[in-house]
Image (cartoon, rainbow, N blue to C red):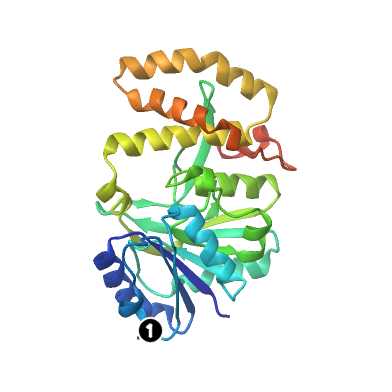
Amino acid sequence: MSISVVIPVYKQKKLFLENLSHNVSYLGQNEIIVVNDNPEESLKDELFHIKNVVLIENAKNMGFGESVNKGVIKAKNQYVMLLNSDVRLHDVSFKKALDYFESDPRMFAVSFAQKEKNGSIVGKNEIYWSGGMFYHRKASDLLPGKNAWAEGGACIIDKNKFIKLGGFDSIFAPFYWEDIDLSYRAWKSKYLIFFDPGIQVEHYHESTIGAYFSKKQIAAIAHRNQFLFMWKNIHEAPLIVSQWFFLPYQMVFHLLKGNTAFVKGFFLAFRLRSRIKKEHGVITDSQIINSFSS
């Protein structure tokens, strides 16, 4: 069974081309859709010789989520592998993911184990609620099983479900939380997300983002999107009340720790509140959060 591969690219051309050259032998004749999100430099000359590559070049910078959305919509196959430009495949084990989709029609995504630069393995995640805030963290084990979210740079998704859910929300641009948001909406719609440690890739997180944004900028955007996620997706009254009750304490706590990015993130999110498209689903917030909290 063929898949489509969507690779969003923003600058870092040398790294992307090195990884694509490495990965193409594992991808075989599968469709590869490259979405170039850097309007200042074309990739046509570098990619013309790869027969199964479809190149989309954005007229303006659109961010990770919108670039992936364009690629998924263009894909000709039902199952689409989302692959960041800084990800390297080890083998063709990603094909195993198709078995999960075939065995359960509720499957939305299968996520991979990712080897970091320091040798640690990530990719299995959990979510929890604490002190009026929604958080995410690495799971306590790497066993096969359900996953809180499928990381947007190393997973295979069902295109039809992706489109039905509306894809990645552009409000989270330029990066972070869009994959958590999409996966949370998938869980609310009674879809499934699975983690398979037997599918492993090499992924040095933030190798692209860190080249163009400072640590303070990255932190502020991450906190901004944390608030946007909550205001968009959390609807149970007790959770909403606890969020606003604890907010002053959270502000003081983070300021005392010198984490001004938290406060900045809140005000950045507040400015975008009118753009939030509130999402509701079949499953309640407590049911989802409690199912992942240790």
- Image quadrant of residue 153? bottom left
Give the image location of residue 62, x and y in percent.
45, 54
Q: Position of residue 28 (x, y in %)?
A: 43, 83
Quadrant of the rendering where the N terminus is positioned: bottom right
Residue 21 appears left or right of 251: left
Q: Is residue 16 visible?
A: yes
Q: Position of residue 228 (x, y in %)?
A: 53, 34
Between 164 and 54, the residue placed more toward the observer is 54
Report x, y in % for residue 32.
Answer: 46, 75
Q: Residue at x 33, y 52 (%)?
A: 205
- Closest to the observer, 80 or 284: 80
Which residue was labeled with disc 1?
Answer: 50
Image side of residue 184 versus residue 216, left or right: right
Q: Quadrant of residue 18?
A: bottom left
Q: Amino acid at mark 1?
A: Ile
Instruction: Give the residue drawn at x 44%, y 62%.
Output: 59
Q: Is residue 126 above or below residue 257?
A: below
Other residues around mark 1 within 10 Å, as few (<14) / some (14–19) / many (≥20): few
